Image (cartoon, rainbow, N blue to C red):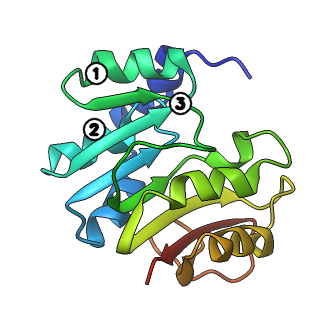
Amino acid sequence: MVWNGDAYQARFDGIAAEGGDVHGEAELVRSLGPGSVLDAGCGTGRVAIELARHGIDVVGVDLDASMLATARRLAPRLDWHRSDLAGLDLGRSFDVVVMAGNVPLFTAPGTEAALVAGVAGHVRPGGRLVAGFSLDRGYTLEAYDAHCSASGLALEARYATWSREPYDGGAYAVSVHRRP
């Protein structure tokens, strides 16, 4: 898939300009009280930039150069890395790792376990992995939960939306997994 970071960001800028809330993911993450966050699959940095605005130490990682170019332009002082999330090794851990924006669905089929292992390896003891994605594209919650479990994480909560509506088996889920 070819991305255009500026066009992608313009979409969210337009939503915000019309009064829409574009920070639901950041609000949920902030409610967990983290001091540090890895925004895995950060895209143009929308979530990372909002978290940093609230004093949270944030690192953003994405594979797409165009998305990262936009993120670096918008927040040049933040720590941005270009990397595949599968096999990611930043040499540190975080209170929260967040995958917003359907990140698991943009990995090559069959690499989901490696993706989860790559990001889960950055969750500190007592920390959380938070991910939201559509369930109608072949990656099931059962598979995701199994990949999290294999990476040493246990399901703590599941929601239907980033605003924490109860999950009732719908087509989208936000999952919070915790490392003991």
Relative depth, front residue between 38 and 19: 38
Figure check: 95 above or below 46: below
Q: Which mark is residue 24?
A: none
From the image, tell me which residue sits under label 1: 74
Closer to the N terminus: mark 2 or mark 1? 2
From the image, tell me which residue sits under label 2: 49
Figure check: 108 above or below 81: below
Q: Which mark is residue 83?
A: 3
27 relative to 128 in the view: left or right: left
Label 2, label 1: how many angstroms apart (C-alpha)? 8 Å
Circle 2: element type: helix
Residue shown at 23% from the left, 70% from the top? 33
88 relative to 141 in the view: left or right: left
Q: Tag 1: Cα neighbours inside 10 Å, few (<14), some, or many (≥20)?
A: some
Circle 3: element type: loop
Figure check: 131 above or below 82: below
